Image (tube, rainbow, N blue to C red):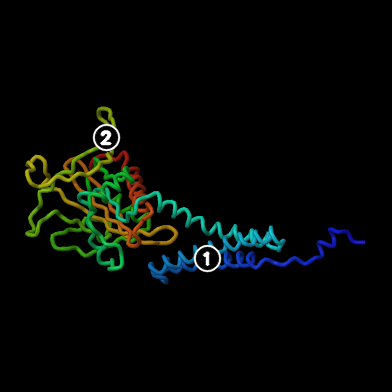
Amino acid sequence: MTTYAERLAQIERPRSRAALWCQRLAVFAVPFLIIVIGGHRYGIVETQATFWLLGLGGLIAMSSIIAGVRGFYELWTYGHEAGLTATRGVLLATVLLVPFMYQGVKAFSLPPLYDISTDLDDAPEFDSALDDRTDEMNPIVEPVEAIKRIQLQAYPKVAARRYPLDSGRVFREVVGLVGERDWTILTEDTKQGAAPIDDEGSGLVAKPNTDANGLPLRTPLPVRRPLRSTSAAPGDQPPIEAVQVSPVGRAGIASDDVNETSNERYVEAVATSFLFAFESDVVIRIIEEEEGTLVDMRSSSRWGPHDLGSNAQRILSFMADLDLALQGLGQGS
């Protein structure tokens, strides 16, 4: 004679359709997102379409979780067979949604900026990057006062650097760090009035400060406002400074306050994000001063009204590596 438990086990339990769809949607979302990300990285899928397809992928994962909740409800209420199927689907969908949730948190906690610069009053200007930009991409404009305040409040550590080294030494380290990051360097032909400055053959050029008539500009030295106090013993090398640059207008500047022989060197490159390979234009300005070199940096996302903090992080990381590369080097080394 069979027991009640054995007879109950012989009863065929209906399978929850919601649980089945939970697993199916989650499994389908995996190759879908892989194809979208890979397609964008290799230039098969355009960036604007990628945003929509990523949103669709997130919607599929969300639908999977909703179907999984329905499956658990049918299991609890009607005894449908749904437990393992719904659990697998919900866990997989949750893993897929973690990057979306992480980026969503940053979107709400960080200001909607896409162009970050160490100098907000006289930001380094893009040149070669403008040739690669289309009308659909984010415009490159000078920040208004409200945007300046927002950046300073959100990213107070984004600041220029001043090094007690000659500009040629600093320039070579900058080019080396750009190469280590696998950024695409935007080279250009040598223009009239500009001379090649990279003896390693990268094709980059120096751009003298000249006006429309080709005469040297009286470029004021940036005003130093150290972010942190530093002390040095007598005879020690001057410390590397992180500075906020506040350009001074040309009117009313005394001859002692300007450097008529200063020049600027630029490195322009295209950086891509690690996972999605979204592009950002980067320009690094190296200004030769009387007692050292000032380095400014600007990073601007090509797509999207919100960079999710990537441009500020890119600048902070690059400047930190540049500090480390130049630490301990003397003037003219």
Q: Is residue 216 left or right of residue 107?
A: left
Residue 84 in percent (x, y) is at 68, 60
Residue under the image location 75 percent in, 65 percent down: 13
Q: Is residue 129 left or right of residue 62?
A: left
User: Is the residue 268 above or below the residue 233 in the image?
Assistant: below
Task: Give the residue pinned by disc 1.
Answer: 60
Residue situated furthest bottom in the rendering: 44
Task: Give the residue pinned by disc 2.
Answer: 237
Give the Cα separation between the discs numbered 1 and 2: 59 Å
User: Is the residue 291 above or below the residue 172 in the image?
Assistant: above
Which residue is more in the foreground, 106 or 146? 146
- If you read the primary sequence from the N terminus, does the residue marked by circle 1 or circle 2 appear first? 1
**Under tag 1, what secondary structure?**
helix
User: Is the residue 240 above or below the residue 136 in the image?
Assistant: above
Which residue is more in the foreground, 154 or 215? 154
Q: Is residue 169 visible?
A: no
Q: Quadrant of residue 165?
A: top left
